[in-house]
Amino acid sequence: MLIPPPFFILLVCLVFSSLSVQAAEQNEWQKWQSEASSAYQAGNYETAETAIRKAIARAEKADNGDIYKASSLNLLAFIQEAKGQPEQAMASLSNAVTLAKKASASPDEQLATLLFNQGVLLQKKHQLNKADSVLGESIEQFQLSQSDGNGKLWQAILLKTQILVSLGNQQQALKLVSTTLSESMDKKGAQLPLSVESDLVISAANIQLKEGQYYQAITSLEQMKKKLNGESKLADKRLSELLNLLAIAYDKSGQTDKAAAIRKQSLNAQNDAPASMATVMQLNELGLYQQQQNHLEQAAQYYQQALSQLKLLNKEHSIEQATILGNLGALQLATHDTKAAEASLSESLALYQSLQKRPVEAAGIAGYLGTLYYNKRQFAKAETAFLTAVENLQKTQSATNETLLLALQNIQSLYIAWDKPSKAAQYNQAIQKIKQQLQ
């Protein structure tokens, strides 16, 4: 969505003294411009377009009306976008930028904002390379003007960062964020608001986690956490996402105890908050951590809380539900609560199969379920589960030789115990082949 136009109207008014437009022409243009703006804000787009085209016609008759026309074309672009005419909006805004470049001295704050609007529209149309270039121009114009354009500079930097990541230019995105943050610390240019600083740190941390730069992410996120803790209103909006990233960074760097502590802090901070998928995943990760620490009762409580949140979110048929049920079922199997384990694992596997997602995880759940039936000497049910595990692993390239070997050995062991040696022998060749590959 484009940035609303009143800001441009103000800018145009500020430069009137330098234009040689007659007062009557100026007043007439302002009349139509204001009428169009009011109609636009009221949602009366046809009326707004009629008025703005009259403003454009008046600007075209002025001796030096390019800056007026640029402002009117900008508002026309908003109107056309609201009417579902993105191509016309793009053309109007492009003409506005061309006129502003012709009429304005460089640097120019109005030109910078028009370029920002153009970049937003290009990004919305998925013309990312053009959007990246235009936003770069916008940022340069703002910086040379030593103005943040009522926050448009920071929006341009954040959007350009997102575009660079989408284009696969992670290092350029990190450089842009790093430069912006360092210039803010050096107190050069416009002052960076804490809300934008936190958004930039979070954006950088997302990139750093993907690039394996875990310690760099931890350092910047910990510093930002301290700043946000002193700003309660701002913290409510951003601290949850920041803590989630920080926990992931600690996990990835092998600091599982610190990751668990951060997740508990995050849950405490969201104690009265409505259910969310972020909370669900925090609870699941805490369940896994407690399970690894052999705190099985606490782990089960976290899994149950996560499932309760999914129910509140109406996500009982999601891949997250399948994952958490599987984790809970594995825990119940380990504690010999076979009845509960069978229910949890069966429901988890059914979800995986219906969603047709994450075949390796589905194979793991089928393996657990097969083991449960094997131990109960329910060989027919165990056969179905173990074969399901093998089929899931054989249809994905993400399966490792180790996991496939285990699945094949499970089904072979079942047939041996079931006194079906001919069926067991069918897997000899595949098992020996994988064993040779693993040597």
Image (cartoon, grey):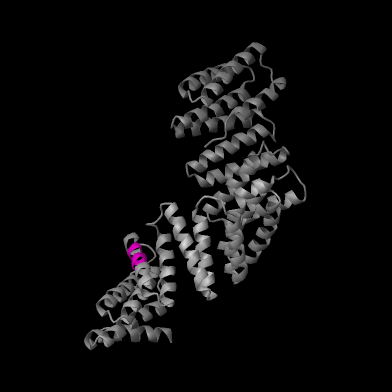
Q: Compared to 290, does 110 lie above or below?
A: above
Locate residue 293 relative to residue 15 in the image: left or right: left
Is any part of residue 173 visible from this angle? no
Q: Residue at x 26, y 84 (%)?
A: 415
Q: Compared to 407, does 53 lie above or below?
A: above
Give the x, y percent position of residue 118: 55, 37
Q: Residue at x 37, y 62 (%)?
A: 357
What secondary structure characterizes most of the magenta part? helix
Is any part of residue 29 visible from this angle? yes
Give the x, y percent position of residue 228: 68, 52
Tell me where residue 396 sits by quadrant.
Answer: bottom left
Give the quadrant of the C terminus. bottom left
Q: Residue at x 61, y 63 (%)?
A: 262
Q: How many marks?
A: 0
Give whichever of 209, 96 is nearer the camera: 209
Give whichever of 173, 350 is nearer the camera: 350
Q: Tell me which segment is drawn in magenta.
A: 346-351
Locate residue 374 relative to residue 167 in the image: left or right: left
Give the x, y percent position of residue 252: 57, 68
Q: Residue lying farthest top?
A: 24
Tell me where residue 240 sits by quadrant.
Answer: bottom right
Q: Is residue 176 magenta?
A: no
Give the x, y percent position of residue 70: 59, 27
Q: Is residue 350 magenta?
A: yes
Q: Compared to 260, does 170 lie above or below?
A: above
Q: Residue at x 59, y 70 (%)?
A: 256
Q: Compared to 52, does 400 lie above or below?
A: below
